[in-house]
């Protein structure tokens, strides 16, 4: 499976990848909104430019990517603010001993990046749906849902078996997140087969890693 960095780069520049369109706004009520099919758009530089998203003025070197592991089903979710994402790119370049040319203008956009990988370990005899069907941000009580600006599938192939599944990469308005945090705790929710919800709580420790604050 390709590295996260490579996958995200391909996702953001390829006009052939189709995403689910949402409006990035807060939409009550409750969890059933999380599984609503909201149409399609393409998550590219040109599309993001139409949204007039501001950019961060400086990179905070202390911000880190937050990761959640679901060992029961072997799904993983990662969450990054702009600085956290840029720091990860820089650190990955250092580890690979490749040249890092600094953050791009797109890297600096005030968006929250979330990527959920489909089950990394699975029985090939399992005939169920392994796909991630949607990713949203929600208030802890489920009363408010923030949909992504756009999201696209991250394909996974299990060896030479021919079995495939899709994870998902999503971009959210950082302003929407910070506004929601003022009202209480926030969870990143990804939706699996049958509308099953997996919540990843952004508690104080994880928010601090991301350079954010909350209750």
Image (cartoon, rainbow, N blue to C red):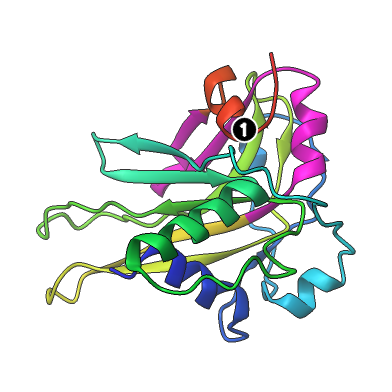
- Report helix, strand or loop for mark 1: helix
Residue 2: percent from the left, percent from the top? 33, 70
Determine if the magenta segment contains residue 165.
Answer: no
Name which residue lies at 63% across and 85% down. 15
Q: Is residue 182 above or below residue 65?
A: above
Q: Residue at x 59, y 73 (%)?
A: 101
Q: Which residue is mark 1?
A: 31
* Residue 77 coordinates in the image, percent (x, y): 43, 44
* Camera-side residue of 111 and 137: 111
Q: Residues within 10 Å of mark 1 (few under 14, many from 20)?
A: some
Residue range of the region highlighted in magenta in the rendering:
171-200
Q: Nearer the viewer, residue 113 or 75?
A: 113
Give the residue at the far top of this rendering.
215
Image quadrant where one finds the N terminus: bottom left
Examine the structure image and report whether residue 192 is included in the region drawn in magenta.
Answer: yes
Q: Is residue 92 above or below residue 69?
A: below
Residue 113: where, in percent of width, then height? 60, 52
Foreground: 51 or 100? 100
Is 13 drawn above or below residue 58 in the view shown?
below
Residue 144 shown left or right of residue 6 in the figure:
right
User: Residue 163, located in which quarter of the rendered image?
Assistant: bottom left
Q: Estimate the x, y position of residue 199 in percent, counting from the top left.
A: 49, 31
- For the image, the number of numbered tags is 1
Image quadrant in which the C terminus is located: top right
Residue sticking out furthest to the bottom: 16
């Amino acid at each position: 499976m390709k590295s996260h960095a490579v996958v995200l780069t391909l996702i953001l520049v390829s006009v052939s990848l189709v995403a689910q369109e949402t409006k990035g706004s807060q939409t009550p009520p409750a969890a059933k909104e999380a599984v609503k099919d909201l149409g399609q758009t393409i998550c590219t530089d040109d599309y993001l430019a139409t949204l007039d998203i501001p950019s961060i003025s400086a990179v905070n070197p202390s911000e880190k990517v937050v990761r959640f592991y679901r060992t029961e089903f072997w799904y993983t979710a990662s969450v990054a603010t702009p600085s956290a994402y840029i720091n990860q790119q820089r650190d990955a370049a250092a580890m690979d001993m490749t040249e890092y040319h600094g953050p791009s203008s797109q890297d600096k956009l005030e968006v929250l990046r979330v990527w959920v990988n489909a089950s990394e370990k699975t029985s090939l005899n399992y005939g169920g749906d392994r796909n991630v069907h949607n990713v949203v941000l929600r208030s802890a009580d489920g009363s408010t849902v923030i949909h992504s600006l756009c999201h696209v599938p991250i394909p996974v192939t299990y060896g030479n078996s021919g079995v495939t599944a899709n994870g998902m990469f999503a971009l959210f308005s950082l302003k929407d997140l910070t506004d929601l945090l003022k009202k209480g705790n926030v969870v990143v929710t990804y939706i699996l087969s049958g509308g099953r919800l997996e919540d990843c709580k952004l508690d104080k420790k994880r928010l601090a890693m991301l350079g954010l604050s909350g209750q």
